[in-house]
Amino acid sequence: MSDRTEADPSPYAEVETALRDEFAGVHSATTVTRCVEAAHYGALEVTGYAHPGLVERIARKHLHVLALVASERG
């Protein structure tokens, strides 16, 4: 049994960082994290795997749609 106390890093940490930078000023870090998590689970349900590149593409689409909706609401 391992005595590790720190959590394993997320396989999507780099994806989250890139998307946070890309959508800075548009979406909060929390929103980016939620979109990455949703993309992860969506990819697993649909394709059976969740490669970071696929998760990034799905999450980016989510973030674009959320930004569009926010801009239409004014």
Image: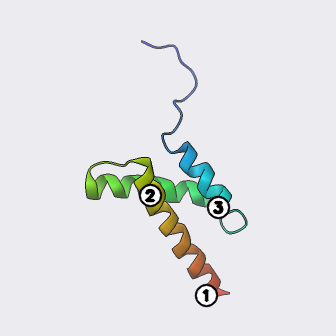
Q: Label 1: which residue? A: 72
Looking at the rendered structure, the kind of residue marked 2 is Ala
For the residue pair 73 and 68, the one nearer the viewer reads as 68
Where, quadrant-wise, is the C terminus in this rendering? bottom right
Q: Label 3: which residue? A: 22
Identify whether 69 is placed above or below 44.
Answer: below
Q: Nearer the viewer, mark 3 or mark 2?
A: 3
Q: Nearer the viewer, mark 1 or mark 3?
A: 3
Q: Label 2: which residue? A: 38
- Contact, CB < 8 Å: mark 3 with mark 2? no
Q: Name the spot of residue 61 as percent of width and height, x first.
A: 48, 68
> Residue 46 is drawn in which quadrant?
bottom left
Residue at horizontal 44%, vertical 52%? 53
Looking at the image, residue 32 sits to the left or right of residue 1; the answer is right
Q: CA distance from mark 3 to mark 2?
A: 18 Å
Residue at horizontal 46%, vertical 14%? 2
Looking at the image, residue 25 sits to the left or right of residue 33; the answer is right
Mark 3 surroundings: few (<14), some (14-19) or many (≥20) residues within 10 A? few
Residue at horizontal 70%, vertical 62%? 24
Identify whether 6 is placed above or below 34.
Answer: above
Q: Name the spot of residue 47 as percent of width and height, x first.
A: 27, 55
Looking at the rendered structure, the kind of residue marked 1 is Glu
Q: Secondary structure at mark 3?
A: helix
Mark closer to the chain start, 3 or 2: 3
Mark 1 surroundings: few (<14), some (14-19) or many (≥20) residues within 10 A? few
